[in-house]
Image: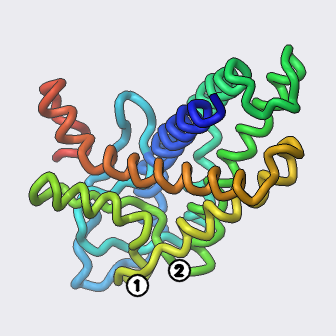
Amino acid sequence: MKLISAVITGLLMAAHFCSGQEAQSAAGQNQTSSVPAAPSATKPAPAESKTMFGMPSYGIVNGLARVPPLKAGDKFKLALTYISPYTFGFVALRAAIDQATDSKHDYGQGMQGYGKRYGADLADGMSNAIFVTGVFPSLFHQDPRYFRRGQGSFFDRTGYAVSRVLVTRQDSGRSFFNFSEVFGNAASSALSTAYYPDNERTAGDFAARAGIQFGFDAGFDVLKEFYPDIMRKFFHKKPPSQP
């Protein structure tokens, strides 16, 4: 029961985070305008996706061309787009699932138990967004956006998308180990031990929460990569991201 709740919770968190990040796409374009002009060798940023499955999408750049880096303040603004009407809806659903499966058992049932679960789940998502998208990308000078490859075979693109949780782009444009993802998820999971019930503060619980988030981030990077293809193949639509 606890495993089922964790899996569903991870899906909701990743889905929300994915939507939150993409809502940034608009922010990303505005942010770009505030960055000094890139060198002549730098190509203009490809169009960024505004929505994904009708939800705001953030932090997705179409194409692998070099684009002006985000300033530290822009990265935190990107992280704060987590707070949106979609967030509260996802968190409400996640808390309801936690309540139904009696996850975080010591919180109890009833409205009081639901309120505690809602607060904990909201804090989980907010801390993850701040650490993964704001704090560590600023410290390590890494770009928290997802750069959609958009070309190559299915397996090549899938491998590329999954690898983004381990490999990211530095502000300088070169590829590097994704310290932001690894340390960000670890920091968020560690912070959750401050407000989770006593029986869910063990090292195993910490590792499980970090691992689930890490895995679903990889899964939703795959979704970000193939979103235009899904829309084109199954809905016969040309996504806004495709010029």
Q: Estimate how packed mark 1 is, as few (under 14), some (14 to 19) or many (20 or more) residues with alpha carbons within 10 Å.
A: few
Q: Quadrant of residue 114?
A: top right
Marker disc for residue 172: 1
Dot 2 surroundings within 10 Å: few (below 14), some, or many (20 or more)?
some
Residue placed at 69% from the left, 18% from the top?
100
| Residue named by callout 2 | 141
Q: Which amino acid does label 2 sit on?
A: His
Identified at 38% across, 59% down, the residue is 146
Give residue 155's position: percent from left, percent from top.
16, 56
Please indicate whether residue 49 sits to the left or right of residue 198 in the image.
left
Q: Residue 154's spot in the image, x, y percent?
A: 14, 52
Q: Which mark is residue 157?
A: none
Q: How far apart in space, not on screen, are marks 2 and 1 (Cα)?
A: 8 Å
Amino acid type, callout 1: Ser
Instruction: Give above or below for 36 relative to 9.
Output: below
Rendered view: 67 above or below 25: below
Marks 2 and 1 close (CB-CB < 8 Å): yes
Left of 37 or right of it: where is 142? right
Front-lying residue, 229 or 172: 229
Q: Residue at x 58, y 62 (%)?
A: 132
The picture quadrant where one finds residue 237 is top left
Residue 31 lies, in percent from the top left, at 48, 62
Disc 1 is placed on an element classified as: loop
Outermost residue toward the top in this view = 110
Q: Element under label 2? A: loop
Q: Residue at x 65, y 45 (%)?
A: 125
Q: In this view, does 108 lie to the left or right of 202?
A: right
How many numbered circles does the render carry? 2
